[in-house]
Every structure is written in C-alpha cells, then in structure tokens.
Image (cartoon, rainbow, N blue to C red):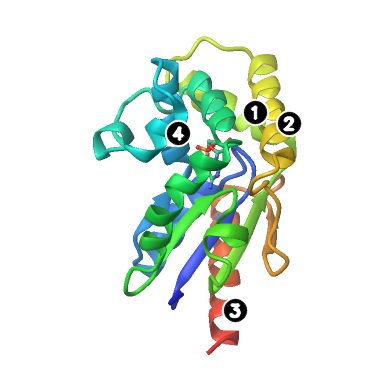
C-alpha cells in the first residue's frame, strides 16, 4: 500500500481528534476524512429502520451530509453498528482509497493506525481523561442548544468507550508505533502544536 504521507489519528470520543486532524490537514495541506462520520451515517440509518449491513454497503454522499449526525443518539447508534464485522468490512475500501490519495491524507477514527492504514507514516493516539472529554462534549452539545446534563454526557462517553475498546473487531487501542498525546491538561493550541511536531519528527525520521 502506498501511504507516502498518510497521517492516522485515533482515540476515544471527544479527546480532540477532530480538531487536531483538521489542523494537521490545514498545516500539511492534505485532505481529511473523519471516519466516525461513516459509522454515524450508518447508525443514523438504522434508527430509521434500515438494516446496518445494507446501510453500510449502500452509503451515499447524501447520507454523510445529514444534519443530525452529531447527536448523542446517533453517536450511540454508531458505536453499536461499529461492532458488526460486515459493517466495518463494507467501509474499509472507501477509507483505504482515501488514505492512498496522491500527496497523502489525514484520517481520524478508532482503527486507522491499527487496521485501515497500518503503514501510515505518522500515527497519533489522542486521549484525555473521561471527565475532561465529557465536559468538552457537554459544552459542545449545550452550545448547539441540546438539552442534556453533564451526567448524561459522561454516561454516554463511558458507554461508548466501553463498546469501542472491548469489541472483537478492530477495538479502539493505540497501534504499537503510535505516539500518545494526552490532551487532558492542554489547550487546543498546545495540542495542535504537539501533533504537528510529532508528525514532523516521524516523517523526517523515515526519509
Ligand atoms: O469519532 P466519532 O465519535 O464520530 O465516532 C462515532 C463512533 O463510530 C465511535 O464511537 C465508534 O464506535 C465508531 N467508529 C469506529 N471506527 C472508526 C471511527 C468511528 O468504530 N474508525
């Protein structure tokens, strides 16, 4: 697999992966794929009665553009469909094709460094304590006007972590060669700076 400049960013919910990945993509002028969106789109379709494997096999750009994909219900539905091997298998080719783009790409998710792009040039595992992640997600969701309590958000994050880390297929875990970035005590700028430095070090080392 030709992964000249593929950057893999994995980690649990609300650790800062999305922000870091977008900043890396802008800094290195690369396209970015939020792979969680694929699982969210499949999860959202199951909430309207579609079979998860059928949904994963027939996903369209329209499905990825729906505006309800960031809700807690869809996040839970996503992590439920993400345990199904046939759902994951249906989404592999699209992700790998994106990773192989000429010039490179940034992909973020749960299994990018371990399963989707095991040869990625730089692998980051972005994490933070459950309390810090829940507080960030709480502020994000209430900022969008959602009526939800801190306790509900923490329970959702913990349930999703548990499902993502303990599933048989592509469980959430750092690749052996991933660099860990714990953002619990970092602001966004510090986290992005640490990520850019890590990628630069990794890519220079492999030249
Ligand atoms: O990243 P995000 O929180 O949007 O992902 C939603 C869910 O999709 C995760 O909780 C996880 O279960 C699943 N997912 C996955 N593998 C990925 C990306 C997301 O299993 N590469």
Decide if residue 182 is on the left or right side of residue 137: right
Of residue 151 and residue 90, the one placed in the foreground of this image is 90
Q: Residues within 10 Å of mark 4 (few under 14, many from 20)?
A: some
Which residue is disc 3 drawn over? 201
Q: Mark 4 points at which residue?
A: 53
Question: N-terminal of the two: label 2 or label 4?
Answer: 4
Q: Work out how far the residue at label 3 is from the one at label 1, CA to CA, in angstroms.
A: 31 Å
Residue plotted at (53% across, 21% down): 72
Q: In this view, does 17 lie to the left or right of 47?
A: right
Nearer to us: label 2 or label 4: 4
Q: Earlier in the sequence, mark 2 or mark 3?
A: 2
- Identify residue for label 2: 131
Considering only order in the chain, which callout, 1 or 4, is on the residue closer to the N terminus?
4
In the rendering, at what x and y percent does residue 62 appear? 24, 34
- The residue drawn where x is 72% and y is 41% is 165
Image label count: 4
Residue 3 x %, y %: 45, 74
Q: How far apart are marks 4 and 1 (CA)?
A: 33 Å
User: 7 or 171, which lies in front?
Assistant: 171
Residue 177: % across, % down: 69, 70
Q: Mark 1 points at which residue?
A: 135
Q: Is mark 4 on a helix, strand or loop?
A: helix
The picture quadrant for ligand 1 comes to top right
């Amino acid at each position: 697999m030709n992964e000249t400049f593929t950057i893999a960013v994995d980690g649990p919910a609300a650790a800062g992966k999305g922000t870091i990945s977008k900043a890396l993509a802008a800094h290195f002028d690369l396209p970015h794929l939020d792979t969680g969106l694929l699982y969210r789109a499949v999860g959202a379709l199951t909430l309207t009665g579609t079979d998860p494997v059928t949904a994963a096999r027939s996903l369209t750009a329209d499905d990825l553009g729906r505006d309800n994909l960031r809700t807690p219900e869809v996040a839970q539905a996503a992590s439920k469909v993400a345990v199904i091997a046939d759902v994951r298998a249906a989404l592999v080719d699209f992700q790998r094709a994106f990773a192989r783009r000429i010039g490179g790409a940034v992909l973020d998710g749960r299994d990018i460094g371990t399963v989707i792009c095991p040869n990625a040039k730089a692998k980051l595992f972005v994490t933070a304590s459950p309390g810090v992640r829940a507080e960030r997600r709480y502020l994000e969701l209430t900022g969008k006007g959602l009526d939800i309590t801190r306790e509900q958000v923490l329970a959702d994050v913990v349930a999703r972590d548990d499902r993502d880390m303990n599933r048989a297929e592509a469980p959430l875990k750092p690749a052996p060669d991933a660099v860990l970035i714990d953002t619990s005590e970092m602001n966004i700028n510090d986290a992005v700076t640490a990520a850019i430095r890590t990628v630069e070090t990794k890519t220079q080392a492999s030249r």
